[in-house]
Image (tube, helix red, strand yellow):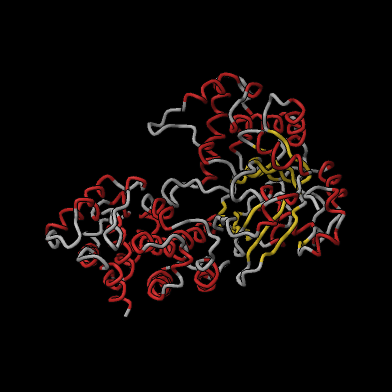
Amino acid sequence: MAVKDNGLNHSKLWKKGGFRLPKFDREKMISATRKNPVWIHFGLKNRHSIFPAILMQRILDNKQAEQGLYVCEAPDAGIADSSHIPYDDVSLLITPDSNGKFIKTVIASVAGCYRCCQTDTADWNELKNIFCRKSLQIASFTIDKEKYEMKDSSGNYKPEYLPDFEAGPSGAELFISRLCALLYERYLYGEQRPIALVSLDDCAQNGINLHSEEKLQQAVYSIVSEWVKRELVEDGFWIYVISPNFVSYPWSITDTLLLSDQNIPEQFSKGSLNHEDGAVTEETYYLVIEDTFPNGRPPLEKAGVCFTDRETVSKVERMEKCMCLVPLYGALAVFGCLLGYENMADEMNDRLLNALVHRLAYEEELPVTVNPEIIDPKRYVKEVLDIRLPNKLVSNTPQQFLADMSQHMSTYFGESIKVYHKERNIQELKYIPLVLAVWCRCLMGLDDDGVPFDINVFPVPEKARTLTAVQLCSHNAGEMTEEYLSPLLADVSVFGIDLYACGLARRVVQYFNECISGTGAVRAVLQKYLQ
């Protein structure tokens, strides 16, 4: 029972094992894709890389499409060699449901896998052929976010890109350069055939400020403009890549959390089933995409994709990152680090922490959440609280989440604070300032029992590192403690707003002082404000 084409012939064995098999003729799908490819996806190792294949499988199963998709490893060929090619591009999807059962699906919608490397002549020529086909509608990406970054912090091009500027399309070495070379082949083939470039990555450096789609677009513009300057490509190629009627860069928001396979039954991860060639996903998953596809697109709405305008994509992202999902994980992360939890799902079994995230969600976040209409915020929050937070397979530990949260406080909590400051009464807030205070308490580097832990593993603001000087049961409370806190709480770059100017800092300081009154004080404060 191997994850290969010939293994799929043993349908009775697969079904006996509880696996869902594809309902379409795989040979016909491969033939149709070769004749008229519609979608190629770059990137095989990131958590979202399997979703294009899942979406295509759904519409193939429902007879709403004939073609599958091609996949391509962008940065290197090793993953394609080890994961896809030996297994005929067939993979497994394991989805734990809310009842603790495992939904097991064989994904067979990939028609072929290629290496995006000019030194591999056969694969490169086939990629050029695919990009020249009039039928191609989408090139999508789940690649390392560093691949989008062409400039350093000073705004200068990174040295590794300079040789590609000089070499032009025929000598492109880095991924974005190779992508531009493939686009140039499509441009030269004639008719200026349109295509949509869809990033499914989350590349924002500070929450929602810059989308991966914008970074992809900027990177393509940079490469092409440098080639045009050096007269290595036709001038018309520049017009081609900047014209939305020819090349579009739809915005998207992919909402799912990475799951750990540590608790997946052994039979899924070892032996002939080759679990490494698949993915473990949440039961809950959203993909929202701006509907700008100049060459058309498959009917992915039939597979659950929400197509909308750019403004609505932004509203969904704001709902997820700023209000209804990430702040709740953030609250569990800060308390989990101090109260000895290693899995945030276990925190949902803690009566007080469970009550905290429910009150934070329903009493403070939902009232200021803008409804994107295509997803109901109340239903979304209920899924988060009832299905996603209790999922023990979500791999982010409190410590891991705290590391990310410490870089994005302005997104996780700052956006809600701004709304309360401008449109409501900031003094209504009780649980957001409590979470902020406990975050500051984490930065002391002592858990609730007074046991030290290393805060250097967290990329916290430099102003916050002075909090290690504060001691439990110390006499630093009051004005002296505020000396340590005030530079941090007033820093707009940390919270997106000056907490003193908006009137919230005093409450954060009050909660913080209560949390340092001695060992066990954090749980005591939690008990006090949740009674």
Compared to 184, does 433 lie above or below? below
Q: In the displayed structure, would residue 229 be above or below residue 207?
A: above
Identify the residue at image location x=57%, y=34%. Answer: 220
Depicted 477 relative to depicted 146: above or below: below
Left or right of 220 on screen, residue 8: right
Where's residue 452, x and y in %?
A: 29, 53
Q: Position of residue 278 (x, y in %)?
A: 68, 51
Image quadrant assignment for residue 418: bottom left
Position of residue 426 measured from the top left corner of the image (x, y, whole percent): 28, 69
Residue 391 seen from this side = yes
- Residue 87 is left or right of residue 236, and the answer is right
Closest to the observer, 45 or 379: 45
Picture quarter with the C terminus = bottom left
Name which quarter of the figure residue 191 lies in: top right
Mark yes or no: residue 363 visible. no
> Which one is in front, 332 or 497?
332
Relative image position of residue 241 (x, y in whole percent): 61, 36
| Residue beneath the point at 53% across and 59% down | 394
**For residue 102, which quarter of the picture?**
bottom right
State left or right for residue 447 relative to residue 208.
left
Residue at coordinates 21% horizontally, 65% vertically from top-left? 518
Q: Count numbered badges in the picture.
A: 0
Q: Residue furthest bottom?
A: 531
Nearer to us in this view, 173 or 188: 173
